[in-house]
Image (spheres, grey):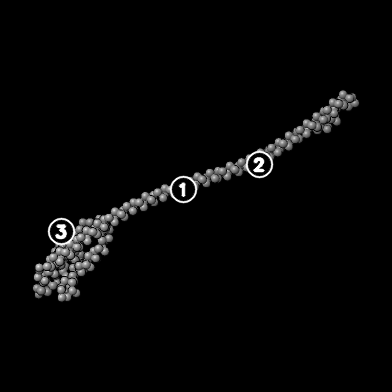
Amino acid sequence: MASELALSLPSGDNHFDELRIKSTSFIRDFDIWISSKKAEYVQARTLHQRQAVSDADNQERTTRQIDSCIAKAAEISSDHHTQRRNIESNTRTLESLQENAKERSSAKQELEIRVNNLASDIKKRREGVPYIVKPFQALYYVAYKYLYIIALAQRRRSRLEQVLNLQPELQAYEERLKIHVGTLKENLLLFKFTHINERDHSQEYQFVVDVNEKAYKVGRSEQERNAAE
């Protein structure tokens, strides 16, 4: 464009020739300046576009990182609440177990004291009494003691689990006194004893107890029926 404009200028006069030369030079320099500015603009725009793309990528990456951190924080918070609930639940369970252990220990000590007292009472009752009377007195006494334990268990039906936990101690109680307690039918208990006859420890003595809600009735023993006949 500058060359075309330069060629259209009039020539022939020195003044016009000088003006034409200057104009041509100015236009050429102006075109060069325009081209350089255009190149700078294109370069700047390209750089800006690249920077914008890079910024968008960085922003997207940063957004993903923030979202990941938020999700991780929520997960940690949920785990913390879950662990706290588990700790509280385990603490309550431990306290309940400790309380049950104390109750079982107290009940066990109470039962051991009763067994020892019962054995001592049986030994005392055997002393100074004719031998033929000793077995039945001991049997009746043990029967009433055993019925007392049953009545105590009935009053503590709400503590059935504790009673079941005392089953090993009750078995030890029966083994120590050589006594077996069974049921014939509802409200009828059968008591069998050995190690009473000094000459024959294997001889069994037994009698039946009728149990109802208000009273206990001890039936005649098998040995008493045989003696009466």
Q: Residue at x 19, y 74 (%)?
A: 202
- The residue to which callout 3 is attached is 214
- The residue to which callout 2 is attached is 50
The residue type indicated by label 3 comes to Lys
User: Percent x, y for residue 112?
Assistant: 22, 61
- The residue to which callout 1 is attached is 76
The residue type indicated by label 2 comes to Arg
Q: Distance between the Cα atoms at labels 3 and 1?
A: 63 Å
Q: Residue at x 33, y 53 (%)?
A: 94
- SS class, disc 2: helix
CA neighbours of label 1 inside 10 A, class few (<14), some (14 to 19), many (20+): few
Q: Of callouts 2 and 3, which one flags the residue occurring earlier in the amino acid sequence?
A: 2
Q: Of callouts 3 and 1, which one flags the residue occurring earlier in the amino acid sequence?
A: 1
Assess whether mark 2 and mark 1 are in contact (beta carbons under 8 angstroms): no
- SS class, disc 1: helix
The residue type indicated by label 1 comes to Ile
Residue 147 shows in the view? no
Q: Of callouts 1 and 2, which one flags the residue occurring earlier in the amino acid sequence?
A: 2
| Res. 43 image quadrant | top right
Task: State left or right for residue 201 relative to residue 8.
Answer: left
Q: Nearer the viewer, mark 3 or mark 1?
A: 1
